Amino acid sequence: MGTFFYVVLAFLVGVLVGWFIWGRLRGELDSLRGDLDRTRGERDKLRADSDRLTGELNACGKTRADLERQLRDAQSGGTKAPSQPPAALMSTPAAAKSAPAAAKAAPAKPAAKAAPAKATAANSAAPKPAAAKPAASAASSAKSSAAPKPAAAKKAAPAAAKPAAGKSDNLRRLIGIGPVNEKLLKAQGVTTFAQIAAWTAADIKRIEDVMNFDGRIARERWIDQAKLLAAGDEKEFAKQFPTAGTASNT
């Protein structure tokens, strides 16, 4: 009887110890499962950030290619424009030289004809300077008419566009705008909250095409945020968008 009692007691003790050990192992298993789920969530978040950064990088590459193309077009347009006035200037000396040559050739014939009689030679020699003067005046008029051409060419050159004046806002206060997006927006001429608040559907489509977005401006409510900040309603902005940047962030 005593032996049976000890056997039952040992069995009960084993069951209690096994239940305690199983509870500890089950708790650790649940903790490991929670860590695994949290790790998966962080992995998905990192993938989303990677996709977003890839999109911003592609948008930067596209913007850079457009800027380089515009710079090449501007340089090619600037080198081709001044090439025309020198051609006009080069043609005027030739005309001026040809006029004195014709003036010199013209008086030679009367001299040859006036050889038989001295009186006629003296009379024909008198008008020679008068014939040379019109040629000289024609050459000077040709030079004076050709001189204003470079000035006209300079006036026809288009004036460079002046950058828009005004104080720019800290666009990174808006949710969804980081340093890269801020640079892309400034490259498109967007520097203030008021500009974003006044965007139309066409403006949103143009900006999203440049920044390689797809409905992100509407999802993150850029325009609503910009309207509050443009109006100076910091209290309502902090209430509606508590995760947005503050006035002192950079």
Image (cartoon, rainbow, N blue to C red):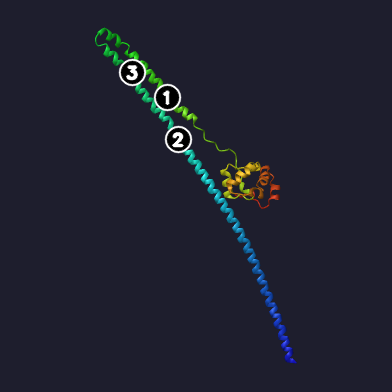
The reply to whether the C-beta atoms of the residues labelled 2 and 1 are less than 8 Å apart is no
**Residue tagged 2:** 80
Q: Is residue 215 left or right of residue 152?
A: right
**Residue tagged 3:** 103
Rendered position, 142 above or below 58: above
Q: Earlier in the sequence, mark 1 or mark 3?
A: 3
Q: Amino acid at mark 1?
A: Ala
Q: Is residue 95 left or right of residue 234?
A: left
Horizontal and vertical percent position of residue 97: 34, 23
Q: Amino acid at mark 2?
A: Lys
Is the N terminus in the top left, top right, bottom left or bottom right quadrant? bottom right
Which residue is drawn at the image coordinates 33% and 14% (left, top)? 129
Q: Secondary structure at mark 1?
A: helix
**Residue tagged 1:** 146
Rendered position, 160 above or below 57: above
Q: Is residue 87 left or right of residue 42?
A: left
Horizontal and vertical percent position of residue 186: 57, 44
Between the residue at mark 2 and the residue at mark 1, the CA separation in whole angstroms equals: 20 Å
Which residue is drawn at the image coordinates 36% and 18% (left, top)? 136
